[in-house]
Structures are given as C-alpha cells and as structure tokens.
Image: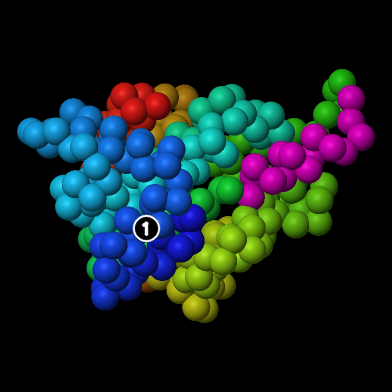
Amino acid sequence: MLPEFHRLISDYNTNPDDILDLIKLEPALAARIVRASNAAFYSPGFPIQSVQDAITFLGFKELYRIVALFSMSSIMMEPLSSYGMTQGDFWKRSVLCALAMEGLCRSNRQPIHQGYTIGLLHGIGMVFVDKLVAQLPQSGSSRIRFAYPGTADDPCQEQEVNVLGLSHAEVGAYALWKWKFPEELVDPVRFQFDPLECRSVGKMTCLLNLAKWITNTICFRDRPDWDDAPDPLILQLLGLDEEVFYTMVAETSCRYEELEGLMTATG
C-alpha cells in the first residue's frame, strides 16, 4: 500500500476520494487512522469519526506520516539479533532518521514526504539480512554478529559484504524496487554509504547521510566513546553549518518522543 500511497501524495492533482478508496482496502489501518487523529497528539477539539473526517482534519502530508508509521511498524518492531538490536531498537532508529530527514528536507527545499519515507526505510535491508543470517549454519561463539550500525568507523557494511557478498543498503534498495517504489526513493537507500556516488538524487542522498548522523548522535550521545561530527565535505557541498545539526538533534529527539506517545496511545 505504501508505494501507491506515496504516488498519490506526490501527485498534486490527486482527488481525496482516491486516497479514501485506497485506505478502505485496509479496514484495520482505517480504524487506526481514525484513532490516531483523535489522539491528544493532534488535539482535534472535536470527535473525528470517519476516515473522511481524518483526511480533512490532518491533511495529506500528516496522513501519509501516519500511514507510513503504521504500515511498517510490524516489520520494524522485531529484534535484529545479527546486529545486536533488541525489540524496538530498529524501529526507533528508523523513525528518528525519518524525522531528521523531514527537518532537513524542509530547510533544504526538498520533498518532505519523500525524505520522510527514505529515512524510515533506509535500513530496511537489515531486516532481510537478519533473516538470511539466521538460516546460515552457525552455533555458539561462531554465530554471525555484525557491528551495531553507527558505531565507531561503522564497519557494518564491510562485514556484511564479507559474509554475504552485499550490504544491507543493496538489499534494501532491491526490496524497495520490488515493492515498486520510485527511483528517487530507491537510490538514496542504495548509495547511503557512498552518497557522493549517487548521480540521480545526490542531494537527497547527502541529506540521508546527515540524517543518519543525527540519528546516531541521539542513539549514542550517552556513550562515553561517542565522538563524531557530520561529514565536512557533505556540509560544504550543501552549504550547511555544523552548528545547525546540534539544534536538529534536540528537535528530532523531542519530535520522536511525541510520535512514540502517539503510537502507544493508538496501538
């Protein structure tokens, strides 16, 4: 559903009835949208009793955020043992990156819903890699473990290539392509480890690199060994100031706490 929803939201000529018809195909999702729109997070001030009312009240962009969150939550909430991620770790990283991308796209005049989707799905390849690794012969101390993404020097990609012959970025890009997401969403995921190599949507891919830094800073800021900074070359190419990102860390963290409350209230 999410690729088709993305296509409709990207088309400025979309009729709200087309979105309504799509949501009606998933009754459980429609119910959660109505519950979400009534949550204190949005403070509607009046009861919202139908998806039609929710679309009118929330608007397309906020509705898309809710659909993306709920449609991917079942996949992203599972633990990823191959990466040392417990239940909810991957979900948190994905949502933080989505929110960081949203802020970066807003300030850099890039499509916000595209950035949000890229941030949310940038690590989806890890889900498939984890399932594949679980099927490989392994036992005890020989069990395959990849570095937790974002740790010092981020050796995760190199380890994946050594074990499987490809990285989770490549796996994730292939999955998005199979799900019929457009190229402008697939390529940033594919080139996330080498953003300057992306020729199709280079700016969005560079923004993903910075969004991942914001995500890592939030996830690891309490660790004494965490000492990192945004890529200076990417900052220079985009004409951005490093100090801006430390402000975005606080803003993204706050926004995540709000969304986490929304998910809990409507789960």
Q: Residue at x 74, y 48 (%)?
A: 160
State which quadrant residue 139 falls in. Answer: top right
User: Residue 188: x, y in percent?
Assistant: 51, 64
Instruction: Look at the magenta stretch and give its main secondary structure.
Output: helix
Task: Identify the residue at horizontal 48%, vertical 61% (top origin).
Answer: 3
Q: Amino acid at mark 1?
A: Asp
Q: Residues within 10 Å of mark 1 (few under 14, many from 20)?
A: few
SS at circle 1: helix
For this rendering, which residue is in front, 224 or 51? 51
Q: Which residue is at 37% across, 58% downward? A: 21
Tell me the colour scheme of the image.
rainbow
The C terminus, quarter of image: top left
Kindly give the residue lying farthest to the top in the view shown.
140
User: Depth check: 127 or 181 in front?
Assistant: 181
In this rendering, the count of numbered labels is 1
Residue 57 in magenta stretch = no
Residues shaded magenta: 125-139
Q: Is residue 220 above or below residue 210?
A: above
Give how far across and how far down residue 224 sits, in percent. 47, 25
Residue at the spot of label 1: 21
